[in-house]
């Protein structure tokens, strides 16, 4: 019987967080564990109150937002709840980059934690947030991960991208190592995924027998493929939490073959951390409305409207507790499917996203100049083709032509190739499509594999 996990959670961790560091993270977590069972009306009342407080602070102490609100003719008093947010303008990534430190608050709490996005889609966005926001972020993460069986103090394997760049100072490295040791968290860098590295990761699982695995979605799929193809699995079900990348149908099947049926998807971004988490009902990703406002918006007739259930739209975020450098109606560049409005079978009334579908910038152009969503490739490579193509990448070049880079499985043949090309040409009218069989799709510096690439300029 493992006694360390309960000892850590009930004695060591509270002593460290509450008495030594005097951080309210665990109090926030206990609060979130109560509110997840509130009614929808209660949850939206909590969210609306937090939103009004944020907007009052931003208008009074962040000149950037005061100027934006005044230009829109809307003050904080005009926004009583989510339905009134349309009065305020969206904040694009480019606007956030251009504003820089002008988005900082001139009054406490000050933004003293610095981060940056991975820059997968271009120039990274540097941003900051305050300590109170960090406590909320950590609590939201712990609640969402708990739905998958994650417990602090129990052995976990994190198959993740490089987390620290530039590398931290020696003293900070010691702190990080000690924190992981006491939490029993093992981190393996997934940015190099050659045969030797994947086999080492598989053997690490065999030795450690983690209670939960957290991974980049496609990195986890690469690892699962190695485990399945080489017959390395000698364990029962290990819950897997996937994030950072789209979870494709073929990836899902591989992960369940390698680790069992307990597969959970998460969705987040560096700017606000965890946004949505899958629960035991596996019917969408619950949004942490106590910490965020998440809008899914459709551009239509020169305007914006909320997406209907099952409809794809752009993700727009408002971080309710980052007063130091607010993100208010921030369009982070992601696409999601709006979820169902009724209460989940798990009993939680937290609203849901049905699925995460990729990036706004993953939009191609046909020969007539029409825009074609990169989401079509989720459909093209589903079903039987998911068994025949191990990985794929779609590149639209500056001249409009498309190259499909394919990493085949043992079932790939000329008929499958012809079927792929026909389907692509049907959706990309008049665009030349060629295929290129490759041994591997290269990873970006962040350890992520970009599925759709549209060359610009």
Image (tube, grey):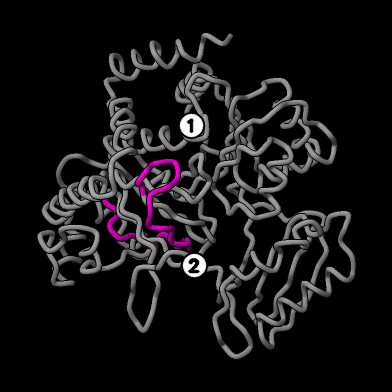
**On screen, residue 16 above or below 186:** above
The disc, 1 or 2, on the residue closer to the chain's N-terminal end is 1
Position of residue 121 measured from the top left corner of the image (x, y, whole percent): 53, 61
Task: Tell me: 418 left or right of 184.
Answer: right
Stretch in magenta: 323-350
Q: Please, what secondary structure does the residue beneath circle 2 have?
A: loop
Look at mark 1 in the image and give the residue it sits on.
168
As drawn, the label of residue 414 is none
As drawn, the label of residue 360 is 2
**On screen, residue 452 above or below 428:** above
Check if residue 451 falls in the magenta segment: no
What's the magenta bit mostly, secondary-structure-wise? loop
**On screen, residue 445 above or below 303:** above
Quarter containing the C terminus: bottom right
Please say whether residue 112 is visible from this viewpoint.
Answer: no
- Please report the residue visible at 45 percent of the width from the left and 25 percent of the height from the top: 172
Q: Quadrant of residue 438?
A: bottom right
Cα–Cα span, label 1 and label 2 = 33 Å
Marks counted in the figure total: 2
Position of residue 71 measured from the top left corner of the image (x, y, whole percent): 17, 72
Please say whether residue 454 is visible from this viewpoint.
Answer: yes
- Please report the residue visible at 57 percent of the width from the left and 78 percent of the height from the top: 372
Quarter containing the N terminus: top right
Position of residue 189 measured from the top left corner of the image (x, y, whole percent): 63, 36
- Please report the residue visible at 78 percent of the width from the left and 59 percent of the height from the top: 389
Of 203 and 178, nearer the camera is 203
Of 142 and 21, nearer the camera is 142
């Amino acid at each position: 019987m493992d006694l360390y996990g309960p000892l850590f959670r009930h004695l060591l961790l509270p002593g460290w967080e509450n008495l030594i560091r005097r951080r309210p993270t665990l109090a926030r977590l206990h609060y979130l564990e109560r509110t997840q069972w509130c009614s929808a009306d209660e949850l939206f009342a909590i969210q609306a109150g937090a939103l009004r407080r944020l907007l009052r602070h931003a208008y009074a102490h962040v000149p950037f937002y005061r100027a934006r609100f005044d230009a829109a003719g809307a003050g904080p008093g005009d926004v009583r709840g989510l339905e009134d947010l349309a009065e305020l303008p969206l904040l694009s990534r480019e606007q956030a980059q251009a504003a820089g430190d002008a988005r900082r608050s001139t009054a406490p709490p000050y933004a003293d934690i610095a981060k940056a996005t991975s820059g997968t889609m271009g120039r990274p966005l540097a941003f900051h947030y305050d300590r109170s926001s960090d406590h909320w972020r950590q609590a939201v993460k712990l609640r969402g991960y708990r739905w998958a069986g994650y417990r602090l103090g129990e052995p976990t394997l994190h198959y993740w991208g490089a987390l620290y760049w530039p590398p931290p100072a020696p003293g900070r490295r010691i702190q990080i190592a000690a924190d992981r040791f006491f939490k029993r968290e093992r981190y393996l860098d997934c940015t190099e995924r050659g045969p030797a590295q994947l086999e080492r990761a598989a053997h690490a699982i065999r030795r450690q027998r983690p209670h939960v695995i957290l991974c980049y979605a496609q990195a986890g799929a690469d690892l699962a493929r190695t485990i399945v193809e080489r017959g390395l699995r000698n364990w029962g079900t290990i819950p897997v939490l996937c994030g950072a990348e789209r979870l494709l149908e073929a990836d899902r099947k591989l992960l369940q073959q390698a680790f069992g049926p307990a597969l959970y998807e998460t969705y987040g971004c560096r700017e606000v951390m965890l946004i949505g988490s899958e629960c035991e009902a596996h019917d969408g990703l619950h949004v942490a409305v106590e910490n965020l406002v998440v809008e899914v918006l459709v551009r239509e007739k020169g305007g914006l409207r909320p997406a209907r259930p099952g409809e794809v739209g752009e993700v727009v975020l408002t971080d309710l507790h980052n007063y130091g450098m607010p993100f208010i109606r921030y369009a982070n560049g992601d696409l999601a499917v709006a979820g169902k409005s009724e209460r989940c079978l798990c009993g939680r009334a937290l609203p849901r996203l049905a699925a995460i579908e990729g990036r706004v910038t993953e939009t191609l152009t046909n020969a007539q100049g029409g825009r074609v969503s990169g989401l079509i490739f989720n459909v093209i490579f589903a079903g039987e083709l998911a068994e025949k193509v191990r990985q794929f990448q779609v590149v639209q070049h500056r001249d409009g032509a498309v190259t499909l880079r394919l990493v085949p499985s043992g079932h790939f043949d000329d008929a499958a190739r012809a079927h792929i090309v026909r389907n692509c040409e049907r959706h990309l009218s008049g665009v030349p499509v060629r295929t290129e069989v490759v041994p591997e799709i290269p990873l970006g510096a962040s350890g992520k594999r970009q599925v759709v690439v549209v060359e610009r300029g």
